[in-house]
Amino acid sequence: MKILIVGSGGREHAIAWKVAQSPKAEKIYCAPGNAGIAEYAECVPIGAMEFEKLVAFAKEKEIDLTVVGMDDPLVGGIVDAFEAEGLRVFGPRKNAAILEGSKAFSKDLMKKYKIPTAAYETFTDADAALAYLEKADFPIVLKADGLALGKGVLICNTLEEAKEGVKTIMQDKKFGSAGNCMVIEEFMTGREVSVLSYVDGKTIKTMTSAQDHKRAGDGDTGLNTGGMGTFSPSPFYTPEVDAFCKKYIYQATVDAMAAEGRPFKGIIFFGLMLTEKGPRVLEYNARFGDPEAQVVLPRMKTDIVDVFEACIDGTLDQTDLQFEDNAAVCVVLASKGYPVQYDKGFVIRGLERFKDKDGYYVFHAGSKRTDEGIVTNGGRVLGVTAKGKTLKEARANAYEAVNWIDFENKYYRHDIGKAIDEA
């Protein structure tokens, strides 16, 4: 099979690496790709939002399967564009990707179908939002309705912070049109867990659990980012939690989308909060998490191409989805100053140390090949992942591997997976 992957980050590198293991994959392309993905795929200079060019490329190269990694093209309707031309593509259509594309939609869906989540209100008028906050309990959460690169969520401890948050999201439009509508949500406390799943429109099969670290600094301080590291599985995701979620959240979400005339095929990422009152949905994503994919896919035993095809064909119920009985930890190496301002173009040294190292992986997020070698080309540069028999062993291995790589302005958190010690 000829396979095209759409995207350029660490998630797409992990997907490309996994696809390359399939005996079905004869030739892999990636648009636009990055320096790491180029090891497995031929990278082509077409942007993820250039639907017409991507469709034309898929036709010209007679692509058998396209896999869309990123949220923007999915929410924008790339799957519809491919299907309209008779091309096989993995991912939700535009009317299903709204599950991630609009937080107001997903909250209303959960309310209608009684899927456990935090109490909330939706606002399109800043003055109405401010009036509501005057009577609210704190802390409280403000969420830009649309896509905001994982950064459109503000946790406000005081009324003053919340007022500033409304100004940031709705008036200053820091997150662009994503802030035209805003959700104000009850603040929940507990452990966060991410559970990714494959969905074929009616059947859902969950992957192994994971936990992301969103804040830029150690001890969960600093600004929200796209993710500074992950571990898998979560020791807090117990069999009891799994049973509850399967009964009240996972299948209920798939059934709700089908009932709304928006059958979902692709990946549903469930962001969960394990509260004292039980698991609650924090958010949905309509694609693999990044960096969650970088710890989940290395533990996946099943041929990923077979799973993609089963989701497209509606035969997921016949697929035996299996994961290794071990653990993985990913530490993101970022550029100092991320997520605000940072320099690019620094040579990355030490990548060759990952060659032929079983259980150690380096996934490229923001890299570029130049005459000088591979250089930094983004805020999040690399995801260093290591496996181990236990989470503690995987964590030690990941931090050992972090030291193999060096580049100017290298920055990373030192406490990824520290919660493991408290489990």
Image (spheres, rainbow, N blue to C red):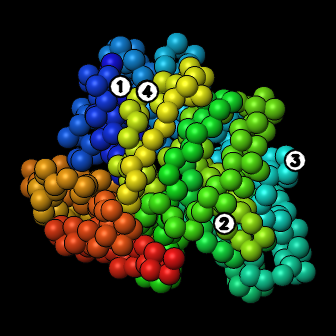
Quarter of image, res 283: bottom right
| For marks 4 and 2 on the same chain, the one whose residue lies earlier in the sequence | 2
Where does residue 327 sit, x and y in percent of width and height?
Answer: 38, 60
Residue bearing the label numbered 2: 273
Residue bearing the label numbered 1: 3
Q: What element does badge 4 sit on?
A: helix
Measure the C-alpha gap from mark 1 to mark 2. 36 Å
Q: Residue at x 74, y 74 (%)?
A: 276
Residue 260 vs residue 392, the one in the foreground: 392
Measure the C-alpha gap from mark 3 to mark 2. 20 Å
Label 1 CA crowd tier, 10 Å (few <14, some 14–19, many 20+): many
Measure the C-alpha gap from mark 4 to mark 3. 34 Å
**Could you tell me the amino acid type at mark 2?**
Met
**Could you tell me the amino acid type at mark 3?**
Lys
Q: Is residue 307 above or below residue 276?
A: above
Label 4 CA crowd tier, 10 Å (few <14, some 14–19, many 20+): some
Label 2 CA crowd tier, 10 Å (few <14, some 14–19, many 20+): many
The answer to whether 25 appears left or right of 116 in the picture is: left
Residue 172 vs residue 319, the one in the foreground: 319
The answer to whether 89 appears left or right of 271 in the picture is: left
